């Protein structure tokens, strides 16, 4: 299709349309996304910077009648699927309003908002809505794939708090989707939401944040040479029965600002007195003969939410892959195997990997995630104890570095395969149908495919991890 053929669409929009004809603006729009590697490999037809719901409806109708695929992304634009080749990308970066109803403890999130936008408004009322663990990640992308955050042990997955969606369908209608109006679609959206239409607004219930939003958090660090000891002690701790869901401990391998390899425990302790929380952190910091650096302190929850932002800058080449795992905490062999796999994985990171953004993350996901409502959510990763992710970045556009990065991330999943529960849609980066089937059980997949067939039979919406050709 010629760019000037889009002039009819241009005249019907209140927002902007950017086409290949305007090379500079087009390149800026294309490379706005978080992952440079994916931006390089995806070449859409154009971008509609929607001013509101009406622009989305207009674009969907136009694209449907002209057989142009539609992709959508928000302000976060972190995923591989927010753009598609030769598609019109509906960009919701201007639709980021977040409104809190403190009396009803509800939040209404426009679909372009990122996690930071949500935290910013909810914290004003000492209320909390789970968002991703990096505040510039889009709220929509996180929520549509299930949604795991720092406080998931306490608050469950994001989908567990979603009460409804407003959505533009493939036929260009604006509909509300909730448990009463369309239970099957509501179920499908709560786990595989980026497939059936363009969500314009989320409605979620909020929880009270104790202690005026202050938690005890931030990393406790050791040199990476202590990783085996520290990680064993940490796994012993997180495997203890009867733990409170408001005590969460993440584990990570990363580099210090000086470039030295380190490992760390990131505690998040909600609702305890400062004294009790510090005493717990003292116990953690004593592992492996004592931590080298203690940053744990009392801080606003929102500060911890933004603490990783600079580690993952935009317009850098990234690959990532993750997996949910579980094990019997009473089985020392299982614990040792996981620790050995993690330590080996870290030691095998390629030399070219940038120090700032190459990390191995182990986030706790049991607690409220495990007890969430399985009947009314398609989110399948309920039975895991940890979400393990490898993220790597490389400094230039060299294809061999990309291949090695991809291999390194894949090898984490392979090493942990004996403990594999499911793959997580949001960082699966699936490269085959088989991998896609490791995200959802077969029955769930069957129902999701039936929903796709019903709501988008012509596959107008080129979005969601089902577009896994975007990774090849
Ligand atoms: C640095 C980093 C940290 C992360 N941390 C977490 C985390 O803590 N927890 C977690 O669960 N995940 C996390 N992820 C994974 C993340 O959830 C996914 O990458 C997610 O898809 C990103 O969402 P986004 O809105 O930024 O991306 P986008 O590319 O904008 O969108 C993601 C997907 O959702 C679709 N989509 C976006 N908006 C809409 C809409 N309005 N209607 C329908 N479909 C839409 C897009 O088409 C695309 O398929 C992280 C990713 C990165 C890169």
Image (spheres, rainbow, N blue to C red):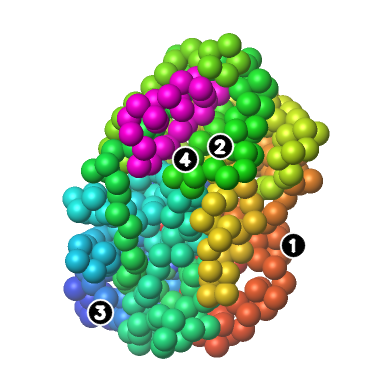
Of labels 4 and 1, the one closer to you? 4
- For label 3, the SS is helix
Of residues 433 and 41, the one nearer the viewer is 433
Q: Is 276 one of the magenta-colored residues?
A: yes
- Numbered label attached to residue 434: 1
Sequence-wise, the earlier of marks 4 and 1 is 4
Give the CA separation, mark 4 to mark 2.
17 Å
Relative vertical location of residue 220 with respect to residue 436 in this rendering, above or below = above
Q: Is residue 265 visible?
A: yes
Sequence-wise, the earlier of marks 3 and 4 is 3
Relative vertical location of residue 467 with respect to residue 391 in this rendering, above or below = below
- Numbered label attached to residue 247: 4
- As drawn, is 324 to the left or to the right of 152? right
- Numbered label attached to residue 361: 2
Q: Do the residues labelled 1 and 2 touch (CB within 8 Å)?
A: no
**Residue 93 x/y as whole percent:** 29, 59
Q: Do the residues labelled 2 and 3 touch (CB within 8 Å)?
A: no
- For label 2, the SS is strand
Q: Residue at x 56, y 65 (%)?
A: 379
Q: Residue at x 65, y 61 (%)?
A: 439
Quadrant containing ligand 1 reads bottom left
Crowding near the residue tagged with mark 2, few <14, some 14–19, many ≥20 C-alpha atoms within 10 Å: many
Of labels 4 and 2, the one closer to you? 4
Sequence-wise, the earlier of marks 1 and 2 is 2
Q: Which residue is drawn at 35% across and 46% down?
A: 136
The magenta-colored residue range is: 262-285
- For label 1, the SS is helix
Relative vertical location of residue 412 with respect to residue 48 in this rendering, above or below = above
Sequence-wise, the earlier of marks 3 and 1 is 3
Of labels 2 and 3, the one closer to you? 2
Q: Is residue 463 visible?
A: no
Q: Mark 3 points at which residue?
A: 54
């Amino acid at each position: 299709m010629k760019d000037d053929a889009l002039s009819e669409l241009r005249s019907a929009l209140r927002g902007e349309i950017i086409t290949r004809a305007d090379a500079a603006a087009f390149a800026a729009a294309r490379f706005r996304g978080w992952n440079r590697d994916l931006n390089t490999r995806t070449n859409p037809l154009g971008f509609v910077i929607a001013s509101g719901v009406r622009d989305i409806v207009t674009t969907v109708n136009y694209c449907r009648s002209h057989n142009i695929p539609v992709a959508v992304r928000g302000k976060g634009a972190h995923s591989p699927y927010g753009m598609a080749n030769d598609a019109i990308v509906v960009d919701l970066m201007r639709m980021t309003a977040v409104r809190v109803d403190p009396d009803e403890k509800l939040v209404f999130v426009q679909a372009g908002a990122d996690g930071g936008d949500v935290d910013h408004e909810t914290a004003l009322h000492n209320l909390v809505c789970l968002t991703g663990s990096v505040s510039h990640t889009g709220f929509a992308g996180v929520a549509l794939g299930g949604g795991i955050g720092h406080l998931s042990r306490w608050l469950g997955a994001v989908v567990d708090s979603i009460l409804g969606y407003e959505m533009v369908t493939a036929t260009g209608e604006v509909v509300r989707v909730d448990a009463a109006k369309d239970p099957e679609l509501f179920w499908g959206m709560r786990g595989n939401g980026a497939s059936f239409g363009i969500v314009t607004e989320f409605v979620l219930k909020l929880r009270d944040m104790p202690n005026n939003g202050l938690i005890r958090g931030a990393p406790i660090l050791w040199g990476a040479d202590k990783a085996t000891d520290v990680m064993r002690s940490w796994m012993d701790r997180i495997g203890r029965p009867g733990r409170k869901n408001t005590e969460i401990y993440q584990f990570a391998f990363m580099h210090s600002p000086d470039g030295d390899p380190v490992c760390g425990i990131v505690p998040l302790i909600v609702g305890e007195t400062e004294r009790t929380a510090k005493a717990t952190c003292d116990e953690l910091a004593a592992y492996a003969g004592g931590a080298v650096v203690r940053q744990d302190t009392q801080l606003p929850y929102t500060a911890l939410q933004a603490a990783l932002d600079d580690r993952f800058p935009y317009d850098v080449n990234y690959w990532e892959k993750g997996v949910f795992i579980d094990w019997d905490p009473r089985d020392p062999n299982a614990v040792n195997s996981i620790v050995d796999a993690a330590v080996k994985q870290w030691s095998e990171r390629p030399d070219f990997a940038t120090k700032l953004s190459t990390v191995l993350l182990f986030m706790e996901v049991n607690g409220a995630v495990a007890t969430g409502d399985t009947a009314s959510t398609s989110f399948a990763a309920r039975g895991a104890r940890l979400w393990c992710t490898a993220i790597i970045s490389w400094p230039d556009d060299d294809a061999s570095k990309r291949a090695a990065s991809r291999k390194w991330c894949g090898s984490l999943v392979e090493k942990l395969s004996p403990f594999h529960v499911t793959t997580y849609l949001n960082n699966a980066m699936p490269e085959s149908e088989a991998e896609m089937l490791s995200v959802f059980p077969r029955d769930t997949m069957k129902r999701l495919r039936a929903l796709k067939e019903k709501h988008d039979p012509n596959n107008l919406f080129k979005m969601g991890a089902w577009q896994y050709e975007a990774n090849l």
